[in-house]
Every structure is written in structure tokens, then in C-alpha cells.
Amino acid sequence: MSKTTFFIRNSIIGLFLLYSNLAICQTSSIKEIDNLLQKAENSRKKFKNLDQLDYAKKASVLAEKSNNSQKIAESYCKIAEALFFLELQKQSLSYINKASQQPYTKTSKLLQAQLKEVKAFNYYTLGMVSQFDRELPAITHLLKGRNDETSLKLLQKTYLNIGASKPDSALYYSKLCYETLKKIPEKDVHLELSDLYKYLGTYFLEKKSDSALFYFKKSLSVNQKYKDPVLFLDYTKFGDYYAAKKQYPEAIDYYKKAIQNIKEQSIAPYHFVNNELYQKISDLYGKSGDTKQQKEYKNKFSELQKKLITKQAKNVDYALNVILKDKNDEFITTQNKNYLFILIGIIILIIILFITYRLLRKNIHQKEAVLNEANTVLQQKDELISQKNMETTELQQKVNNAYEEVIKLAKDNDPSFYFRFQEVYPEFQKKLREINPSLRTSELILCAYTFLGFTIKDIADYTYKSVNTIRNRKQNLRKKFSIPTEQNMEFWLNNLIKPK
């Protein structure tokens, strides 16, 4: 066996093993993605939407690395859902759009329906009720004829939402919902069945019908049957019923049980501020003539509201940081893919060159042809060098344009300034967070202004802050970075970020 044949055979075996390992790794990756998506769904059921966002984001990173369109789309859908619950409608709609552009989405009616549901809720929250009403029938059309459990659950939920927007047809759509749920074993849809009973109970309560209590009891019964620990919504509905009946002690007792259940299950409370449990208890104590308890629960309600506002602000900041990191991860992923393609190209080129070299040595009589080929290669290289020089010049022009664009966005105090800045200086945030991982987004933006050479007065003018405020914030940043007093902060940032 010649050395050339031996080398070719081993190269083929090596490539086969490489692709086999890649296939095994991809299968393992898909299992991990499915596991993360299931954790995201479990977090949603427990109203832990920050955890839902974290799990869905991790799933999307793995999906993007494996280039699996289905898992990418499913991950984006979960991220959009979490962002909706965190009241970040603009960002949620952005991820819905990203998911819709995936090739898999265009072939999956179920995923299209799921995305439409999240989109509809975003429209409703933004006050676009007509858009909300248009999305819901489209979901039922997409799911028509499907009998898998996921589709049926989404279909029955859509019926309830349509019924809620059309009070005159509420009972009709409730019946459609119940007929859909009967197609699935009760143990798998007890949560959905409970929601239906609470929906009917609320409907009859508004009609002042005695049937309300019957359905509220059925809702609690089905949850207890399957040992669901999250019962605060059932207790709240009982409280509403007894409050409407002016049986205030019973109503207060159920509202308190709801509060206790929220605490026991560690449920993120800001989702349920609309329930105003403490406010309801305070009002009922007032109607009962107990002014002391009325005042006590009113104060508790006020304290909770303050905590909820602070918590919501932190959650929004955290979610936005996740999105910023997502953009940075997309850039890194693209870079890694480029490196991989270059590496594969180099390996293939080396193999080709080696085989060519061996063949040329065996054919000395073809020296002239070899020389001509070498001249051709040299000419191609010269052309390539010339082309690369032109590309370098164009790239330099793009960098200059990008710099000018970032400067203009900064001066205009444009909200997209920091996103664009990170695209131009992708290492900036990473380097600073290596020194201090707890930096807030506002602090990173101030560092960006300083890095670009803006003075304290400039920054104050562009961001509509006082000079003293900017000076104090920069002083706090110098302490966090341990910058010596005698060293200029702009020079320090440039020295840290730019290549030495």
C-alpha cells in the first residue's frame, strides 16, 4: 500500500469518526434542550417567570449551536412567553418575530398557533383589543382537526378567551372548551378543567346566580383530587363569592387562605397584585366596622405595593440584561461558526495540497505543466491579496462609519445607543464584567460614554442629567474598578478594551 493511499484512507476514516461524534453530540444536545424547555414550562405553571426565562434562554443557546430550527423556534416561543409575563411586550413581540422566521415554524401549525396566542396577549396588554380579537379565531383555524394533547389544551384555552371577549356567547364557548377537554384523560388536564370551572363560577357570580358556588367547589375539588398544592386562585374565588353575598367573615377567611397559599408555594407575588387580596380584606373589615383591622390590612397592602414595584423593576432590569447577553451570544456564535468553516477549509486544503505534492513528485516529466500551474496559483494569490486589500479598505470605512453612528446615537440619547455600541465594541461589556460582574446596565452605558471621550458636561447634556449626578456616578465607577486617582478613566477604559 502506497503512502498516498494510506493517508487518503486514514483521512476518510477520520472524517467519518468526526461526523459520527457530531451526530451523537447533537442527539445529546436535543435531549438537554427538551429538558430545559420542560423546566421552563414547569416554572411557568408555578408563576416563576424569571426562572422560565433563564431555562428558555439556555435552551435557545444550545439550539442555536446545534442549528436545529425546531428547537430554536420552540425556545424563542418560550422566551417570548416569559417576557410577556414580565411585562416586556416589545421584547416579547421581537422574539415572536424571530421564531416566526425559522423554517420549522413555517411548517408547524401548532407552533404558529402558540406564537399567535402569545402575540394576542401582548396586543391585549398594549390595549390593541381589535388585534387581540383577530388573533384568537386564527388559532382555532390552525388547530382544526388536530387531536394531540398540546393542541387540544391550547384550543380549549382559546375557546375560553374568545368567550371572555364575547360575554353573550360565554356559555357556548365554555361548552366547546369542556367538549375539547373530555378528549384528554382528566389527570392530564385537571389544571385546565379547574380553570374552566372558575371561569363558569365567575360568569354566574356576575349574573348573581347560585350556580357560582357550585362551580367554585368543582374547581377546588378537582385540584384537591390531584393534590395540586397551588390553590390560592380557588380560595380567592370563594372569597369573591362570599363577599358578594355579604358574608364578610367567610370571605376574609378565604382571602387569608389565598395569601397563605401564595407564601407557602413561594409564588412570585407581583403577578397577583390585581387580586389586591390585602385591599379586599381591608375593605371587608371596613364594611364589618372593624376599623383597626381595616387600617392594618390597608397598610400591609401599601407596603406590598412598594415591594412589588421594586421587585418588578429588578425583574425588568434582569430580563433586559438577558436580552443584551443574547445579542452578544449571537455574535460569538456567528464568529465560532466562521472559525469552524475556516478550520475545515484549511484541513481540506492541506489534504489537497499533500496529495497534489505526492502526485507531482511521481510525474517529474510534467515539470512544465507544474510550473505553469504554480504561476497560475501565484497570480491568483496576487489577485486575492489585491482583493483583500480592497476589502480591508472597505472594512476600515465601515468601522469609521460605525464609530460616527455610535457617536450620533450617544449625542441623541437614542435608546438603541448601547445595543449598537456593543456591536461595534463586542469585548467592552465582557471585559468590564470580568472585573465587576455586578455592574448595572446604566453603569455600562456611562462607561461607554466615557470610553468614547465624552466629558462629564457632555454626558450630562446628552442624557439630561445634572453634572453633579454624572460626576458622582463616575466616581462610584472608579471605586468599583479601583482606578488610581491620578489616572484618567477614559485612558484606563481604552487601555483595557483596545488591543495592546
Image (cartoon, rainbow, N blue to C red):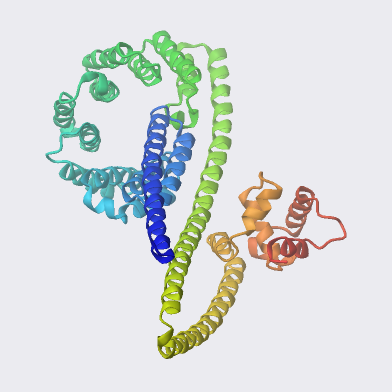
In the displayed structure, would residue 242 be above or below residue 374?
above
Residue beneath the point at 56% across and 45% down: 317
Q: Vertical placement of 305 versus 479: above or below?
A: above
Residue 448: x and y in percent read 66, 61
Residue at the location (55% across, 43% down)?
A: 318
The answer to whether one can see residue 87 in this image is no
Using the image, determine if residue 349 lies above or below residue 47.
below
**How many labels, in total?**
0
Residue most extreme to the right: 486
Instruction: Residue 389: give x, y in percent of width and height.
Output: 54, 83
Q: Is residue 459 left or right of residue 165?
A: right
Give the quadrant of the N terminus: bottom left
Spot occupied by residue 75 in the image (x, y as percentages of width and height)? 38, 44
Image-quadrant location for residue 117: top left
Closest to the observer: 383 or 160?
383
Residue 343 visible to an observer of this rendering: yes
Which residue is at the far left? 145
Identify the image quadrant of the C terminus: bottom right
Q: Nearer the viewer, residue 279 or 422?
A: 422
The answer to whether residue 120 is left or right of residue 167 is right
59 relative position to 181: left or right: right
Quarter of the image for residue 465 reads: bottom right
